[in-house]
């Protein structure tokens, strides 16, 4: 936390005390940064943190340094700290750090910690001022899976190919591994989004290997682009039970292993910009094949797919006010849109099987450095929120509400 | 309409009124050492989005843009198919993912002519009729 405060002070100091706030440059090194603070309030359930009572545990700040030692070589690092309810806790982490050699426009090589494409917006999901919405649609940009989507420690190639009359094509291929925090919300997703409140505590989440492919086509039609991304991970998650749940033969102290042979995401995207209007639609399909064992005894074998989609738009009124909205749906199982198969002894909450989100948002651009957003969500279902964050109601039930609302507000400074 | 509603109505109309832009043309200029005399509209788009980063002789392309001028509005919508806000966001995405360095930005035709004239590999744009000085004018095919 102390380190995070130091980074915050440095970021603020650089932002406020440089003669040109849009960027600071020292000895050929470009310095940019951002700081956001938000507020979340839900009518029911807990959207990462104690949002039912209103939560200020919603902030992020980052600063990056980048330089070009020669015409073809680029190096840089971005450090990021964020607090999002039970996640992040303002711990300072390296967001990306890599060296880049661009031999030709159509071929470059990168090595280090590289932001990974997933859909159109994954690489910039933590940089609030780059979009109209506060929250990207959870169907494709799930907060519960954020740590598995962000960056990859490895190497890759990329390039931009000019197709002349056919527009232009950008591609990226990355291979490597990931460090995924074992104590945050992603562990809940990997262990199965059950209704039980934290029955296991993860000891480690080991991403053995992962590769990511991204292809983006800027078509000859003015403002129209398409994207396709694909990634596959091999993951081994080890946990121990912190409470007994006899209904599923899990007892306190049991070693629980989730072994994923396959964790594949495919995202198809399209975006159309006409003047101040932007329309976007994306579809995601996640294929999983895993085996969960309790004390070496097979408990659950899974081989199925999940999916989701959204349609969204935003419109820019003059320079200072942007309105936007989207409708998003996601499902735990493609073959079960109503959550019927998710119910089992001790877990009768079918709405853990889906998540539907209608969002309206407003983004006020104060100037080049400041913006304020106000956003409302109408949720149906609880598939995309963590069991870790839920607090039982008076009857001892968690996820008691299928229909619930979220109000979010956020202010961001960037330079 | 109550008198108190009139200022609110005027304010709302002002907010939703379309942004005005003066009609006119822009001219593409480049440093005299840049090894081309003409570019296609598609070339210009690729260059100003950072997707074409070197000239045919291997020299690095240095992009210069204008900050919120009429010339900038015309240039960006005509050649880059983005408005000024969208163009700014595009480059911030490059910066905050480590992929690129934002273009140098200038507030007038005069400043951009000076920069392009003095910087090898530089390309920019100015309002039609601006004295290009030592920079050369690039034809658009």
Image (cartoon, rainbow, N blue to C red):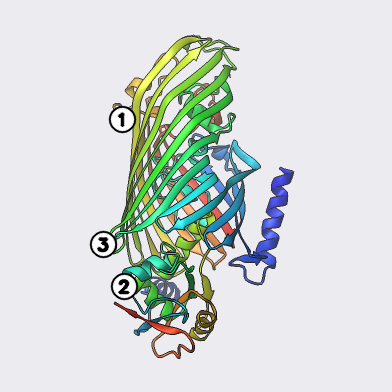
Question: In this view of the protein, can residue A399 be seen by the observer?
Answer: no
Q: CA distance from mark 1 to mark 2?
A: 47 Å
Q: Which residue is mark 3?
A: A221
Tell whether A113 sits left or right of A156. Answer: right
**Residue A178 point in image, percent of width and height:** 54, 35
Identify which residue is drawn at 54% across, 24% down: A394
- Give residue A13's quadrant in the image: bottom right
Mark 2 element type: loop
Q: Nearer the viewer, residue B25 or A91?
A: B25
Q: What is the number of callouts on the image? A: 3
Question: In this view of the protein, can residue A294 be seen by the observer?
Answer: yes
For the residue carrying disc 3, how many other residues have a C-alpha within 10 Å: few (<14), some (14-19), or many (20+)? few
Judge depth for marks 1 and 2 and give the one in front. Answer: 2
- Give residue B90's quadrant in the image: bottom left
- Give residue A184's quadrant in the image: top right
Q: Which residue is mark 1?
A: A334
């Amino acid at each position: 936390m102390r380190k995070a405060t130091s980074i915050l002070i440095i970021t603020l100091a650089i932002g406020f005390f440089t003669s040109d706030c849009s960027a600071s440059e020292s000895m050929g090194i470009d310095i940019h940064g951002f700081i956001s603070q938000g507020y979340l309030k839900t009518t029911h359930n807990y959207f990462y943190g104690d949002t039912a009572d209103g939560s200020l545990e919603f902030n992020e700040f980052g600063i990056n340094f980048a330089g070009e030692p020669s015409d073809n070589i680029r190096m840089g690092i971005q450090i990021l700290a964020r607090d999002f309810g039970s996640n992040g806790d303002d711990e300072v982490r390296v967001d990306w750090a890599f060296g880049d050699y661009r031999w030709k426009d159509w071929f470059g090589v990168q090595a280090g910690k590289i932001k990974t494409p997933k859909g159109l917006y994954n690489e910039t999901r933590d940089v609030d001022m780059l979009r109209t919405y506060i929250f990207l649609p959870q169907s494709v940009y799930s907060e519960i899976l954020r740590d598995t989507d962000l960056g990859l420690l490895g190497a890759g190639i990329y390039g931009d190919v000019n197709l002349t009359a056919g527009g232009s094509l950008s591609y990226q291929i990355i291979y490597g591994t990931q460090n995924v925090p074992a104590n945050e919300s992603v562990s809940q997703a990997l262990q199965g989004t059950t209704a039980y409140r934290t029955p296991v505590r993860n000891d480690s989440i080991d991403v053995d290997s992962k590769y990511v492919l991204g292809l983006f086509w800027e078509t000859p039609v003015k403002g129209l682009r398409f994207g396709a991304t694909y990634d596959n991970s091999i993951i081994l998650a080890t946990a121990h039970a912190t409470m007994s749940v006899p209904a599923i033969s899990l007892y306190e102290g049991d070693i629980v292993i989730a072994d994923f042979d396959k964790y594949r995401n495919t995202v198809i995207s399209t975006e159309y910009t006409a003047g101040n209007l932007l329309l976007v639609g994306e579809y995601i399909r996640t294929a999983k094949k895993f085996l969960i064992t309790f004390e070496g005894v097979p408990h659950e074998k899974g081989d199925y797919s999940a999916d989701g989609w959204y349609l969204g738009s935003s419109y820019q009124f003059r320079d200072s006010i942007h309105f936007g909205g989207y409708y998003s749906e996601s499902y735990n199982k493609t073959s079960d849109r109503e959550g019927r198969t998710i119910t089992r002894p001790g877990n009768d909450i079918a709405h853990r099987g889906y998540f539907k989100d209608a969002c309206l948002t407003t983004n006020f651009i104060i100037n080049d450095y400041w913006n304020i957003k106000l956003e409302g969500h109408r949720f149906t279902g609880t598939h995309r929120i963590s069991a870790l964050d839920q607090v039982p109601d008076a009857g001892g039930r968690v996820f008691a509400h299928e229909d619930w609302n979220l109000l979010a507000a956020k202010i961001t400074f960037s330079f | 309409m109550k008198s108190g509603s009139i200022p609110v109505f005027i304010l709302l109309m002002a907010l939703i009124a379309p942004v005005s832009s003066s009609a006119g043309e822009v001219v593409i200029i480049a440093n005299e050492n840049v090894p081309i005399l003409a570019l296609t509209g598609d070339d210009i788009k690729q260059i100003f989005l950072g997707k074409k980063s070197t000239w045919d002789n291997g020299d690095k392309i240095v992009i210069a843009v204008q900050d919120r001028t009429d010339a900038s509005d015309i240039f960006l919508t005509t050649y880059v198919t983005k408005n000024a806000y969208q163009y700014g966001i595009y480059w911030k995405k490059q910066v905050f993912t480590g992929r690129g360095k934002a273009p140098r930005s200038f507030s007038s035709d005069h400043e951009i002519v000076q920069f392009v004239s003095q910087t090898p590999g530089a390309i920019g744009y100015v309002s039609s009729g601006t004295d290009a000085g030592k920079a050369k004018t690039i034809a658009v095919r």
